[in-house]
Amino acid sequence: MFIRSFMIVVMSVPAIFADETIDRFSLDGKQNIMAGEHLGVVNHHVTTGTPYDRVGSIDGLWAPPYVSSDFACNLTINSKLVPVTRYVWWPMKFESQGILDGLTMKTSLLLIAGKRAAVQSVTLHNESGEKKEFSLEAALGKNTLDWSDVWEFSRERSRTPTTAEVDQQTIIIKQGAYAVVVATNRSGWIWDAESRQGRCSVILEPGQSETVQLVFAMGVTNTVLADIQEIVSNPERSIARSEKHYVEEFESLYEHLPRFHSDNKQLERLYDRSVMHFFMNHWDVKEFCLHPYYGTGSVRGGCVCNYLWNYGETWEIIHLLDPAASREHIKHFLGLNLTKHFAFLPVTGKAFGPWYMINQEKIIGHVYFYVKLTGDADFLSQQVDGRTIMDHMLEQALALDDPEKPVALIDYGPSNSHLELRRKPNYYNHVMPDLNGRRYDNYIRVAELAEIYGEPKPFLVERAESLKQLLKEKLWNRETRWFDFINDQEKLESRYTIQMYKLIGSPLLDHETEAGLLSHWNENEFLGKYGVHSLALQDEAFDPADIDNGGPGACTCFPPQIAERFYKAGHPEKGGDIIHRILWWADRLPYWGDSVVAHEIDYRRDTPLQCTLDSVAVAQCMIFGMFGIDAGFDGTIVIQPSLPDFARTMSLQGVTIRGLTFDIDVTPNDFTVTVGNERITASPGKTVFLKEGRSPTLTP
């Protein structure tokens, strides 16, 4: 076997990172159901599309605030695309391979750590028994390029034409002060500025291999050229440094979040893939308003903005991972008018969009769990726009309410923004029971925060109890065993939405109403073979085309959220059943997007939000639901795990809450909690209590 002496890497697919921690996030293409136009990689600075129908293709570059949405790089051999026979995906890396005319092409695209740059390594191997002379080409296309401070739900698109110039083995595609630059140090490589194509001649003896590396970068021209020069001078060094950095970064992720282990490896993979969404939606961009910034989306530039709807679903787990960043995100949201808007932009930090009625629940929940899990009650005294966090909490709890009058059910108006049902805009509006019901916990949580703050507000508890009575009196339907809503004609009507199960575990429900809701939790209504239905199958509003809230499936965060509530409400078998139905997510999707189908293995495909932050709700459910972990305002940590019937063992290693670090190991016969050198074992159903400075204790 003959090997060229320059820039040679003999690669296999899949390539293995130096540590299994990062390799566990990979996905072999044989398992993947995600469409090629939705697949991409990201590294906190840049994201690009990685279609898998042709070897080594790149589709679009987004490095907020820079965007070249129509950028492309297609590799060919003698002007022929190489069809993919195998590919492997990692969050920041993509490998593919294929065979054409006796030549094997293997490519490895790696985003360079800390930069808006990437290296595409192209390894060519002569599989035949004869000498091969051929041309390797890269066609870039005539892309546009822009700087944008608006990154909303859709993928940001570039529109301004570019010019191109060539400097030896580098092509510089410019628009004003910005550029996309592609370079190689392969001798004999020739770029043509007009066609934006590059090529080199390759001669391979039988069994011989050669690797050519192309370096990509985007941003301000001078910065890009400096990055390109550094990387192209020694691509292997940049690759090695980046892979080492990513290994360390994922190890660090598990220094803040617990590691989950189980004999059920699919359950283990489900946890890991959920946690991975923190890496993929974490942006470290100097032009952004927060550092770091956790966006709603990321891949291929989709939904880089920050919706409180999505960020709110992380309201427990993010305080374990990054409490400092969480504080800043909470404060930024409170600086917006949360009765007018639902999101803010990453560059300007400005609010945009209409009001979502769940804003108040999400921001209150974030502050509530932050204080419980960190013990940082002083946070309530910090100020946003001249008012304390506690002042803001009171305002949010009383939004659309008049504390001078008896509690009343809120008419949320004709907006269709809660469920966004497509078939008819008035299917579920006005006096909605799930939204009114959530107000109960809003009152109670803010009342608890007020106690911690030292300024008790007992009237909030009184309003909560009055609301409980009013909701049952006005909206509970004893015949259907469901809460009705009041429509625009002031008539009662039923809408069997999964949102009602967000009330499970709340004292708002009494025995009758909880039992009534649970009577509908079955495979004829809400349960699908592969998940849960957002509308019951028999609901007249059920829409086969409306996956997220219209019935065929549900938003990615809904199944784990409902499961966590079942666990906390004392229905662990129902919580475990939901997790069992979605285990396939771990093995068939590289990351999880807007919503997932319940009756078959599929996902919503008509949205740019293919990688959503609230996917961490699965890991959150497993920590705080399956393992039954809770924290009291007095510093007590409660642990009461429930082993699902599809696992024989499970453990959490390195849980850190309120300065205490502990492990939990669960078997069918007992569970053990270890804190430092102390260990306590309990039988199923018992509860372990931890508190700093005390030995672990059991319930009597």
Image: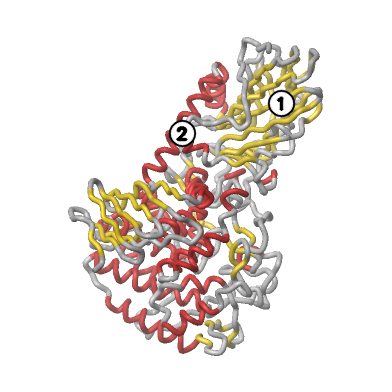
Q: Where on the picture, by quarter, is residue 102?
A: top right
Q: Given the current orientation, which residue lies at the most extreme front position?
A: 669
Instruction: Give the mark nearest the N terminus, 1 or 2.
Output: 1
Q: Mark 1 Cα within 10 Å, few/some/many (few <14, many 20+)?
A: many
Q: Quadrant of the N terminus?
A: top right
Q: Which mark is residue 583?
A: none
Proximity of marks 1 and 2: CB atoms separated by less than 8 Å = no
Q: Is residue 355 above or below residue 345?
A: below
Q: Amino acid at mark 2?
A: Val
Q: Position of residue 586 (x, y in %)?
A: 56, 50
SS label for mark 2: helix
SS label for mark 1: strand
Q: Position of residue 330 (x, y in %)?
A: 39, 55
Q: Which mark is residue 247?
A: 2
Q: Where on the picture, by quarter, is residue 543?
A: bottom right
Q: Residue at x 70, y 38 (%)?
A: 52
- Cα separation, mark 1 vs mark 2, equals 27 Å
Q: Position of residue 100 (x, y in %)?
A: 79, 27
How was this image coloured? secondary structure
Q: Is residue 654 above or below residue 143?
A: below
Q: Which mark is residue 105?
A: 1
Q: Amino acid at mark 1?
A: Met
Q: Position of residue 276 (x, y in %)?
A: 50, 45
Q: Residue at x 41, y 59 (%)?
A: 668
Side of 329 relative to 228 (left or right): left
Side of 124 relative to 430 (left or right): right
> In the rendered picture of this protein, how many numbered marks are placed on residues?
2
Q: Nearer the viewer, residue 441 or 260?
A: 260
- Report if residue 346 is visible in the image: no
Q: Residue at x 23, y 62 (%)?
A: 634
- Report if residue 501 is visible in the image: yes
